[in-house]
Amino acid sequence: MMTCRLPLSLVNKIQGRVRYGEPLRNHTTWQIGGPADVLVEPASREDLATILAFIRQEALPLAVIGNGSNLLVSDNGFRGVVIKIGEALGRVNINGERIFAEAGAKLGRVTAVAQAAGLGGLEFAVGIPATLGGAVTMNAGANGAAMADVVEKVTVVDYEGNECVLEHAEIGFGYRRSRLQELKAVVVEIVLHLTPDDPREIKRRSEEYLRRRKVTQPLEYPSAGSVFKNPPGDAAGRLIELAGAKGLRIGDAMVSERHANFIVNLGNARARDVLALIGRVREMVQEKFGVTLELEVKVLGESGAD
Ligand SMILES: Cc1cc2nc3c(=O)[nH]c(=O)nc-3n(C[C@H](O)[C@H](O)[C@H](O)COP(=O)(O)OP(=O)(O)OC[C@H]3O[C@@H](n4cnc5c(N)ncnc54)[C@H](O)[C@@H]3O)c2cc1C
């Protein structure tokens, strides 16, 4: 098996953390995934530029992750460099109705900052365990709203090292998608434009959304949220339930009894168990309804499922 390492001269230049053979299960909410050859958490944009230049020079495979809450990582892990954009790149500032935040900021922190400042419009996202960069890339949404409703622009650094600003219309938002997913670029900063509102009202709505999540989602188990996208005009969970797949289990991966579009890790689920379960659920829904479910989760590593 080929693995890569970074030269010491490069590691010494980087302030952020560099780890070799790091199990990616430690960096995904499903708690599944084999090792990355190299996992780097840049502490600054300079770190990021230094790492990207090296990766480009050596033509190494690269993956970018945030909080790993929408990721199924192969049991074999990832042969190459994984750049994790985390809290070290997570500054959040407010100016009037706008929040200027770095991509590594946890969405929970950004929603709290917005609430405290009396800025409404982001409370739909309370409880989504994402980084802001991951949420924008996925156009994460809930409660009838999505990131596209509040994002004004994003700054990205492409794999060539060029920084550029994409205005809202250039981001190509769609249902759980954006052009950022294909761009070969790292999202580093986001500008949100929110609406002044009474902090008590924002708090009330946020608490209600959180309460509903606790009732409808199996939050006591590791998961990646909804596994499949909703097909047009329907809910994937409804189809999976009616196809009789609730409670279906392969290894320690199980279709949740509480929310049929969640696959939970009961303890030691492997990626191959989840992939087998995904395949089985798809077959059952296809057979019963003639609908092909599309994956919402992103598969990283050598055992692609889509
Ligand atoms: C309990 C639970 C509840 C959830 N509820 C919801 C929900 O209500 N609505 C919803 O939409 N999702 C939900 N999710 C799924 C998930 O939280 C979202 O998809 C989220 O947007 C992923 O963000 P992340 O930072 O974890 O990104 P990751 O999972 O780390 O990455 C997701 C994708 O974004 C890319 N990416 C991440 N950061 C960057 C960056 N800085 N630059 C470039 N690319 C990047 C990755 O390459 C990958 O393709 C839920 C998940 C869980 C576990």
Image (cartoon, rainbow, N blue to C red):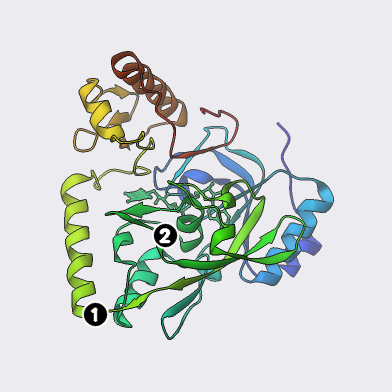
User: Vertical placement of 57 versus 101: above or below?
Assistant: above
Type of the residue with mark 2: Met
Give the residue number, with chain letter if any, for mark 2.
Answer: 147
Label 2 or label 1, whichever comes before in sequence order: 2
Residue labelled 2 has its Cβ within 8 Å of some atom of ligand 1: yes
**Nearer the observer, 166 or 189:** 166
Q: Is residue 33 visible?
A: no
Describe the element under mark 2 as helix, strand or loop: helix
- Locate residue 302: give its quadrant: top right
The residue shown at (42%, 59%) is: 147
Name the side, left or right, on which 27 lies relative to 287: right
Outermost residue on the bottom side: it is: 96
Give the residue number, with chain letter if any, for mark 1.
Answer: 199
Describe the element under mark 1 as helix, strand or loop: helix
Q: Position of residue 287 (x, y in %)?
A: 33, 13
Q: Position of residue 165 (x, y in %)?
A: 64, 67
Q: Are marks 2 and 1 in contact (CB under 8 Å)?
A: no
How crowded pointer 1 is (Cα within 10 Å; few <14, some 14-19, many 20+) is rated as some
Type of the residue with mark 1: Pro
